[in-house]
Image (cartoon, rainbow, N blue to C red):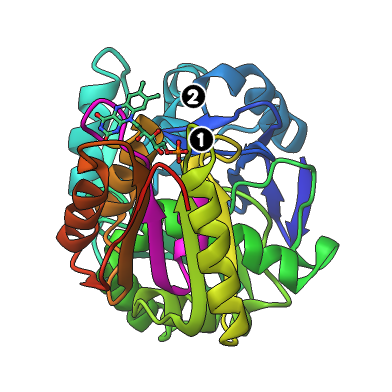
Amino acid sequence: MIKIADNVYSVGVIDSEVRIFHGYYTPLGTTYNAYLVVDDQVTLIDFVKEKFAEEFLKNIEEVLGDRTIDSIICNHVEPDHSGALPQVVDKYPQAMIYGTANCQKELKAYYPDAVYDFTVVKAGDFLDTGKHHFSFIPMPMVHWPDSMSTYLAEEKILFSNDAFGQHTGTGELFDTDKGLERLLDRAGDYYANIVLPFGMQVTKLLDMASAFDIQMICPSHGVIITKYIPEIIEKYISWSKNETNDKQVLIVYDTMWGTTEKMARLLEQEYTSKGFTVETVNLTEEHYSHAMARVLEAKYIFVGSPTLNNTMLPSVMAFLTYMKGLKPKGRIGKAFGSYGWSGESIGQVNDLLASCGFEMEDPLKALWNV
Ligand SMILES: Cc1cc2nc3c(=O)[nH]c(=O)nc-3n(C[C@H](O)[C@H](O)[C@H](O)COP(=O)(O)O)c2cc1C
């Protein structure tokens, strides 16, 4: 438990061990952030993953002692945020849960046996807990239909849920602990792997949030943002518009016997000598979500695979399928790869990149060797 403002406590937990998050590799683990606001009435904002329910309840008790929770704001139903709901409502049965209409439906589906009262909230609604006033900012699809943010006027805090999140489970608490570069690196990694398809919805959220004076952003994963609010908002505006760096190339490949790797190195040399910044990811050595984080600001996405049994390597297929789902826009693609006789992989990679809506450069093929 940590006090983060007058009467506001961080009561979430650190999960330093989690490594895969719905297909997204999290080398630093993550945190499940939840917050308590103590007023005439006590409000809990979000829960944690079910596995950490006991630790979570202890954190809450450390702040409240024998006091009870009157209101629970459920910003998002996904089990990393709502998993401990049954245990919390069991201990604090009188608490009223506030969330969007979709939140109500999804909670019923996830926790059919839990007993609790629920009030549906929408934009413009307030919760008054004595000296504190919460307002609700629904942000559907950032990143589920139920998602919302909550603003606490007196402390100027935006509880942003998954927006502005970062998977950083190393014990850092504030953006000032490790600085701006670290924050943007972790937030960018998260944005690329989770938020990227929802640029339009992020724009709406930023428009709505601009009406509030925000001095602190408390996301549901990672560090609390205090110092670098303008910087992170500027990045969110840029990422939501799919703005890329025209001089940045990402090369992603895999290889069996090294020729496709040689092709990747040749492309790297060519583009570096032309003044581009080039990042190269070998999918045997790095997870595809690491490559995805690099997609965020790269204008050029070059993808290479040799032909294996008339198709591309599974690792390359996994990356391309994953990237397609995350809907990056406005990129320039190029397929490359080596083959022995039929060479289907290069055309298949080309077609998948084209199906992402990328403008395509001519593919590069190498028979056996370069
Ligand atoms: C198990 C296996 C299956 C292969 N299947 C095909 C194939 O269906 N069509 C083809 O053109 N080449 C095929 N090849 C040849 C490779 O594509 C060729 O060796 C290529 O140069 C490998 O590129 P790399 O060095 O980047 O791994 C196959 C090679 C292996 C080892």
Q: Residue at x 43, y 51 (%)?
A: 193
User: Would you say the beta carbon of the disc 1 residue lies within 8 angstroms of ligand 1?
Assistant: no
Which residue position is annotated with label 1?
47
**Callout 2: 10 Å neighbours few (<14), some, many (20+)?**
many
Mark 1 falls on what kind of element? Answer: loop
Q: Check disc 1 and give the amino acid type.
A: Phe
In screen coordinates, is 14 left or right of 45?
A: right
Q: Position of residue 9 (x, y in %)?
A: 70, 49
Q: Quadrant of ligand 1?
A: top left
Q: Residue at x 28, y 48 (%)?
A: 144
Q: Position of residue 135 (x, y in %)?
A: 39, 66
Q: Which mark is residue 84?
A: 2
Q: If the image is split into quadrants, where does the N terminus sit?
A: top right
Vertical arrangement, residue 295 with respect to residue 85, above or below: below
Q: Is 245 in front, or is 96?
A: 245
In screen coordinates, is 14 left or right of 341?
A: right
Q: Are marks 2 and 1 in contact (CB under 8 Å)?
A: yes
Mark 2 falls on what kind of element? Answer: loop
Q: Check disc 2 and give the amino acid type.
A: Ala
Q: Is 157 in front, or is 292?
A: 292
Where residue 199 sits, quadrant-wise, is: bottom left
In magenta, the rendered stretch is 291-311
In the rendered image, is residue 138 in sight?
no
**Is 80 contained in the magenta span?**
no
Vertical arrangement, residue 250 with respect to residue 288, above or below: below
In screen coordinates, is 318 left or right of 19?
A: left
